[in-house]
Image (cartoon, rainbow, N blue to C red):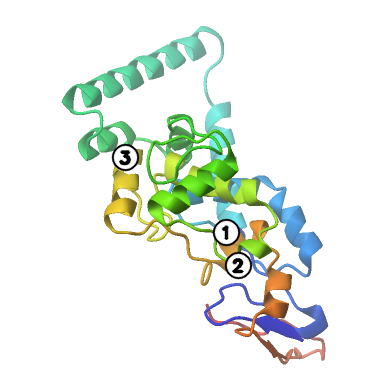
Amino acid sequence: MTHVAPNMPMQLSGGSRGGITCYTAPGVIFADEEEMKEHYRSDWHRYNLKRKVAGLAPIPKEAYEERAAREQEREGSVPSGGNRSQLRRQKREAKAQAKAEAAAANPNSKAAHYELTKSMSELAYVEHKMTSAADFDEGSDLFSRHHSPTLHANLAYMAKTHGFFIPHLDYVKDLPGLIGYLLEMVYVGNVAIFSGKQFHSLEACQAHMRDKSQCRMELEGHEEEYEPFYDMEAMASKSPLWEWVEEEVEEDEDGEEGWEDMEE
């Protein structure tokens, strides 16, 4: 027996041999929560989280391993000794020149952002977003540059000023982690929480959310993404929107049970 919710992307299948899917592991079905927790400790999971906050879709494990291997090969092919130092210096000088030219034009413009990032590899772009983000902590407002002394003071301020609230707060098991994830999405990736649109700057992202009256997060339809911060099992067992279903497990030609193909 498994439980599913309307429009819920996380699907459990196969009765006692059911599986769990995860946002950061596309194409993978975990046998149980222990396997999924093990995935949460992997570099692949962390990389796909970085892609999420940078406004990029998650990639399958095979693609991640190929990119990681190429990156290691590229780093290993760099000459040693004086040539390595010279190459590093040239890269720093080229990067500094590109930044200076973009800043001279308009440091906050889309053109400046494009000029700075157009030649970056995907890995370099993700790292750039992580290292160039504005400073933030749990007291930082998601929708403006206001800062509160504590997390709870920040939540109270955002509720009063922007009408922001955490859906199903009673089932949140990691509130600091959830707010931290949303802050990374906005401050690092410049991604609007509700619409998922990415912007060239933090200011543009926050202005969009305020102007569109989208100072909110939506849990329904994003359960996989927010699963690490919620007790989804408890929520499912107590919600009238959920129903219990039993799914057939097909047998292969050898008479053994196999996974039934599931459409996205």
Q: Which residue is mark 3?
A: 203
**Residue that mark 2 sits on:** 27
User: Secondary structure beneath disc 3?
Assistant: helix
- Residue 9, how many percent across, how many down? 56, 73
Task: Classify 10 Å Cα crowding around label 2: few (below 14), some (14-19), many (20 and above).
Answer: few
What's the residue at 30%, 38% (across, down)? 118
Q: Nearer the viewer, mark 3 or mark 1?
A: 3
In this view, the residue in front, 30 or 193, is: 193
Please identify, in this view, whether the residue under mark 3 or under mark 2 is nearer the observer.
Answer: 3
Residue 26 visible? no
Residue identifier under label 1: 60
Amino acid under label 1? Answer: Pro
Residue 149 appears in the rendering = yes
Marks 3 and 2: CB-CB under 8 Å?
no
Q: Where is residue 252? Give x, y as percent.
A: 75, 88
Q: Distance from label 3 to label 2 (Cα)?
A: 35 Å
Q: Secondary structure at mark 2?
A: loop
Disc 1 is placed on an element classified as loop
Q: Earlier in the sequence, mark 3 or mark 2?
A: 2
Asked whether 223 or 102 is in front, the reply is 223
